Image (tube, rainbow, N blue to C red):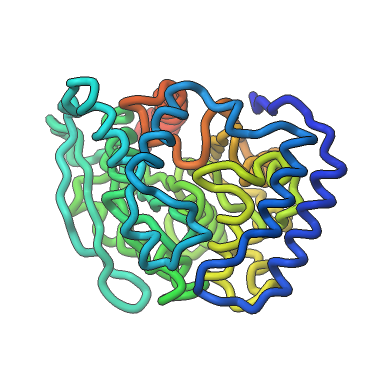
């Protein structure tokens, strides 16, 4: 598979601490308010003594982005309400600030964007279509993209750079969807919207100048979970199947005792406390978070899916579940690329103007999609 795992750490004590934390998390009432993180701080200090501070493993350019975010006033998610979390500074703004300090302007990317409306499960959803300049064909590959944010934050603008990068590097049309967010719209609202968006794309592909035989899925964290959900439903005979899916650090389970949770308890922007916070917004209780649409690593029905690319960040609590998902897909006979990029955190993929590993990930992903899109398969 080409998966590159980080250096192994002595995790037994860390995992015991995480188990204790998870028990605490699920014993607390499910509230949409910020949580008390004194227990997490203690566990994080234990983890650092055993495995080291994960933030010390940051690449310099990734650290630059996170430091700039902190300077701009970004605070840990778990200390905020969802409303405040959605308003606080984002990585895209940190990139703009860094470029400004360096006297650089954003380069022209050769991609035009158009805001549209997409039919969701219970009403219209905001969407955005990205088209590489100079498209001449009436039958272009199309990628349906779902933004990240743990089902709670994120929108078309927060992940604009990711969608643009995919369009620019593949020459494909990219359609980005702003699905409904929790806690206002708890699970499974986002999943229902994702499937509705796929159905909409299949109905509108000709109007978009797309090729119905060359449709793909992509997403980041929560969005990657949605992409996998759509691929499974399509595989089960409920619509056209994608030719490829790209899962960027996917949410693939609810096991907060996984190794990477122990290694990244105090990681930023997303560690154990932030993941706990996200799950409290999305799910009514622990049982709901075990639904097979979330707990992908527990599924055994992966056979027959399209080839899959999984992109993982080395400093990310979701890494272990991403690796487990890659193993499950491979064991089911699905062709899998799984790449781990060390020194970066969750949310790195769209930061290519500053973060070198993001450029590597974008290039590798584009290569995989390019192979899936060529040769064209017309009916």
The answer to which of 284 and 142 lies nearer the viewer is 284
Q: Which quarter of the rendered picture does the C terminus lie within?
A: top left
The answer to which of 34 and 187 lies nearer the viewer is 34
The answer to whether 66 is drawn above or below residue 325 in the figure is: above
The answer to which of 48 and 298 lies nearer the viewer is 48
Q: Residue at x 18, y 34 (%)?
A: 111
| Residue extending furthest toward the right | 12
Q: Which quarter of the rendered picture does the N terminus lie within?
A: top right
Q: Is residue 185 visible?
A: yes
Residue 348 rendering spot, x and y as whole percentages: 44, 35
**Would residue 247 be found to the left or right of residue 49 on screen?**
left
The answer to whether 235 is drawn above or below residue 180 in the figure is: above
Q: Report which quarter residue 328 is drawn in.
A: top right
Q: Is residue 328 visible?
A: no
The answer to whether 42 is drawn above or below residue 98 in the figure is: below
**Would residue 266 be found to the left or right of residue 175 on screen?**
right
The answer to whether 168 is drawn above or below residue 78 in the figure is: above
Q: Residue at x 56, y 76 (%)?
A: 31
Q: Residue at x 84, y 51 (%)?
A: 16
Residue 14 rendering spot, x and y as whole percentages: 80, 44
**Would residue 40 be found to the left or right of residue 114 on screen?**
right
Q: Report which quarter residue 343 is drawn in.
A: top right
Q: Residue at x 37, y 55 (%)?
A: 154
């Amino acid at each position: 598979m080409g998966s590159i795992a980080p250096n192994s750490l002595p995790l037994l004590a860390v995992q015991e601490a995480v188990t204790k934390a998870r028990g605490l998390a699920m014993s607390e009432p499910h509230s949409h308010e910020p949580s008390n993180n004194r227990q997490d701080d203690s566990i994080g200090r234990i983890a650092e003594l055993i495995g080291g501070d994960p933030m010390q493993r940051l690449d310099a350019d990734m650290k630059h982005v996170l430091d700039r975010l902190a300077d701009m006033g970004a605070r840990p998610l778990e200390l905020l309400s969802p409303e405040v979390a959605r308003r606080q500074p984002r990585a895209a703004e940190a990139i703009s600030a860094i470029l400004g300090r360096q006297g650089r302007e954003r380069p022209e990317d050769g991609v035009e964007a158009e805001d549209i409306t997409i039919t969701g499960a219970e009403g219209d959803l905001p969407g955005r279509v990205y088209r590489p300049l100079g498209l001449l064909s009436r039958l272009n590959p199309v990628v349906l993209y779902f933004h990240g944010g743990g089902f709670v934050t994120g929108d078309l603008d927060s992940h604009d750079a990711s969608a643009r990068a995919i369009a620019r590097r593949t020459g494909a049309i990219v359609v980005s969807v702003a699905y409904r967010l929790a806690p206002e719209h708890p699970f499974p609202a986002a999943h229902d919207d994702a499937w509705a968006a796929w159905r909409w794309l299949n109905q509108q592909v000709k109007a978009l100048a797309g090729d119905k035989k060359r449709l793909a899925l992509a997403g980041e964290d929560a969005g990657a979970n949605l992409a996998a959900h759509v691929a499974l439903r399509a595989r089960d005979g409920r619509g056209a199947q994608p030719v490829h899916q790209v899962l960027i650090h996917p949410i693939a389970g609810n096991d907060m005792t996984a190794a990477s949770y122990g290694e990244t308890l105090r990681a930023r922007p997303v560690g154990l406390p932030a993941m706990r916070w996200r799950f409290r917004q999305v799910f009514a209780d622990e049982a709901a978070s075990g639904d097979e649409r979330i707990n992908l690593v527990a599924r055994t029905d992966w056979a027959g899916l399209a080839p899959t690319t999984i992109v993982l960040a080395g400093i990310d609590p979701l890494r272990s579940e991403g690796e487990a998902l890659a193993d499950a897909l491979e064991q089911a006979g699905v062709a899998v690329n799984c790449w781990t990029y060390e020194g970066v955190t969750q949310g790195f993929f769209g930061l290519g103007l500053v973060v070198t590993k993001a450029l590597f990930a974008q290039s590798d992903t584009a290569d995989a999609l390019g192979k899936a899109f060529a040769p064209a398969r017309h009916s």
